[in-house]
Amino acid sequence: MTPSELESPEDRALRAAVAALGRRHGREYDRAALWTEAAALGWLGVSLPEEYGGGGGGLVQLSLVLEELGAAGCPLLMMIVSPAICGTVIARFGTAEQRAAWLPGLADGSRTMAFGITEPDAGSNVHRITTTARRDGDGWILTGRKVFVSGVDIADATLIAGRAEDARAGRLKPCLFIVPRDADGFTRTRIDMELRAQEKQFELTLDEVRLPSAALVGDEDAGLLQLFAGLNPERVMTAAFAVGMGRYALGRAVAYAKERQVWRTPIGAHQAIAHPLARSHIELELARLMTRRAALLHDAGDDTAAGEAANMAKYAAAEACADAVDRAVHTLGGNGLTREYGLAPLLAASRVARIAPISREMILNYVSHRSLGLPKSY
């Protein structure tokens, strides 16, 4: 680690302020109220350009905000989607009109954008996306389906990944489109999830949705670059989300282990309890460092190195989070499954980072191919 990777005084102050806000809201938080307050403090737009009302910081600061809210038990899932993915893509590739129309609202929290990429039959293979866009006069017509799209009901628009025909090459190429929530032919169906979360999941249907030419984000010939520009922030923020959740679970377990007595001494004095919790602390700190490294590389504009680090951070954080939650529940015994202690819902929530936005197996594929140079099996 180089000195530049250590937190600055400004970042430490930001972390402390966000942690205080999170403690005030706690795990019974109201999502809308917390979103509004975090926005008013400038934290939702901390990574967006100052000229559009943002903080002029980077993913380092935005991931820090999400981690600390998660550590307090009140994570804001839409931070991953709206400012991190959509805000990054529009700030980097959007037209001047798109930046002016969307970035101020994304920065101050008054506007929210969802992100639709996953499809029923495409899985993690973005090259198999079947949502298609065809030109119609000076506009576009979109047709297709998306699944597991977060927060569409509270979003003003959804950034949709589709594929447009390349007239010169005769093939389909990826493109991104801004689809307003009230567009004709654009419908949503809520997916009934066992997972308890304030942000809901939806299946989207695009049935001949007509869009103006201005709905296309950036250059249609740079669609794949634009798409992947949003995926690195998604992985970094998912890692921050997981680290925060793991820290919350670990904190609850440590507090309980210090107070709970069975054989005249707190259970935390026994190595069978203490060592697993110590391992979780180590694993979460290691994941936290990799998350920061990935964010720093992204902010430095090194997309290739950031891609490798973001995938590693997401993997490490997901594993550390799931293990921390499991160990926390085990520490509390039966109390770990009660509503009072608030850990049981995390058993399902902690699995999310292992399977979304990309499974840990696909990350292992990425690392084995890109980092180690091993041959592909597909």
Image: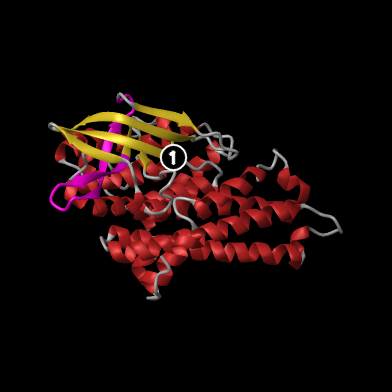
- Is residue 178 depicted above or below 332 in this figure? above
Image quarter of residue 94 = top left
| Segment colored magenta | 160-183
Q: Position of residue 4 (x, y in %)?
A: 34, 67
Q: Give 218 or 4, whichever is nearer the viewer.
A: 218
Residue at (37, 76) in percent of width and height: 373
Q: Is residue 180 magenta?
A: yes
In the orientation shown, which residue stands out farthest toward the right?
A: 263
Q: Pointer 1: residues within 10 angstroms few (<14), some, or many (20+)?
A: many
Q: Position of residue 1 (x, y in %)?
A: 40, 72
Q: Position of residue 169 (x, y in %)?
A: 16, 53
Residue at (20, 45) in percent of width and height: 165
Q: Is residue 140 magenta?
A: no
What residue sits right under mark 1 in the picture? 147
Q: Is residue 277 visible?
A: yes
Residue at (57, 46) in percent of width and height: 349
Residue at (66, 62) in percent of width and height: 277
Q: Position of residue 189 (x, y in %)?
A: 46, 29
- Is residue 125 depicted above or below 302 in this figure? above
Q: Give 192 or 323, whichever is nearer the viewer.
A: 192
In the orientation shown, which residue stands out farthest toward the front?
A: 170
Image quarter of residue 283 = bottom right
Q: Give 66 or 85, whichever is nearer the viewer.
A: 85
- Is residue 195 depicted above or below 358 in this figure? above
Q: How is the image coloured?
A: secondary structure
Number of labelled discs?
1
Where's the C terminus, which quadrant?
bottom left
Q: Amino acid at mark 1?
A: Val
Tell me: 31 left or right of 304. Answer: right
Q: Is residue 44 visible?
A: no
Prevailing secondary structure of the magenta residues = strand
Q: In terms of secondary structure, where does tag 1 sit?
A: strand
